[in-house]
Amino acid sequence: MTIRKILVFTSICLTLNSCVSTKKYKAQVSIYDKLKSDYVIIEDQLKTCLTEKDASKKKQQDLEDQIVELKTIRNIMINQLSDLSVISKQQAESIQKSLENIGAKDNYIQTLQTQMSKKDSLNMTLVLNLKGALGNINDSDVQVKVEGSAVLINLSDKMLFKSGSYEITTQAKTILSKVAQVLNAQPGIQFMIEGNTDNKLIKTTFIKDNWDLSVLRASSVARILQTEYAVAPERIIAAGRGEYHSISSNETEEGRTSNRRTSIIILPQLDQFFKLLEPK
């Protein structure tokens, strides 16, 4: 029997027994009040339980949705890992070869760096030897320096030749003999003798223009080194650049004097580097 039915039944009994004694009536009223109070309490508890049940269902649904989402993410990750696994298996050999190539290239670069460092050291040694051999010669007449990858000896025009001439002076032979000593001490190197002029026009019976003059001067120096100082001719390159490789402005006498020069360029041994570039 539910609480509501009990209350109805009790109410009927009280009505039917209205003739009972006051003591019994009060007792029945007390019981009724107690039952009514219990009913209200139980009803409130029921409402609370229903509310909590709804909240629990919502929470359960949220958890179920989260589980579904996590399962979806898990499946995606599994598929990605599977793809990565396939790629690594298919390309493992290629990756290994790439790593080997990187190692080989690293060794190659280190070898080039070693060779370059060695070349730079040789160039500096050569410069010091040349300066030591030339002694206290005026720096304006003879300049020795490293330019790029080559050693450069600039010989002034006034020291080597008379104006407009390609005949070597006696003073020039003294200088060239000292240069030849250093060159002969390094039989493995090649060098180029390069004639340069200013932009003043020249035309004589034997000289057509500055091209002619620059080449003839370079040839004169090459010939002296070969015939008088025993420098092997196969090591020599004679070239002329006319007025087209100036190092100063031709607008001033001082600039033109600087441009009239003969350079001995000690060339880097490029064949060694070409060998390094050849496939192994």
Image (cartoon, rainbow, N blue to C red):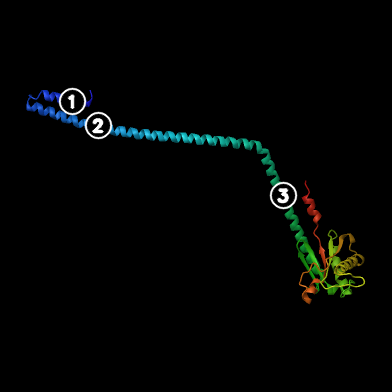
Please name the residue that numbered disc 2 is placed on. Answer: 43
Q: Are marks 3 and 2 in contact (CB under 8 Å)?
A: no
Is residue 182 something one can see in this rendering?
Answer: no
Sequence-first tag of 3 and 2: 2
Q: CA distance from mark 1 to mark 2?
A: 16 Å
Question: Which is more foreground, mark 1 or mark 2?
Answer: 1
Sequence-first tag of 1 and 2: 1
Q: In percent of the image, x 77 and y 50: which residue is there?
A: 277
Could you say which is closer to the camera, residue 188 or residue 87? 87
Q: In which image quadrant can residue 240 be found?
A: bottom right
Q: Give the quarter of the figure containing the N terminus.
A: top left
Could you say which is closer to the camera, residue 260 or residue 104? 260
Sequence-first tag of 1 and 3: 1
Q: Secondary structure at mark 2?
A: helix
Q: Residues within 10 Å of mark 1 (few under 14, many from 20)?
A: few
The vertical placement of 64 against 200, above or below, is above
Please name the residue that numbered disc 1 is placed on. Answer: 8
Q: Are marks 1 and 3 in contact (CB under 8 Å)?
A: no
Please name the residue that numbered disc 3 is placed on. Answer: 107
Name the amino acid type tagged 1. Answer: Val
Residue 27: x %, y % from top left? 12, 28
Question: Which is more foreground, mark 3 or mark 2?
Answer: 2
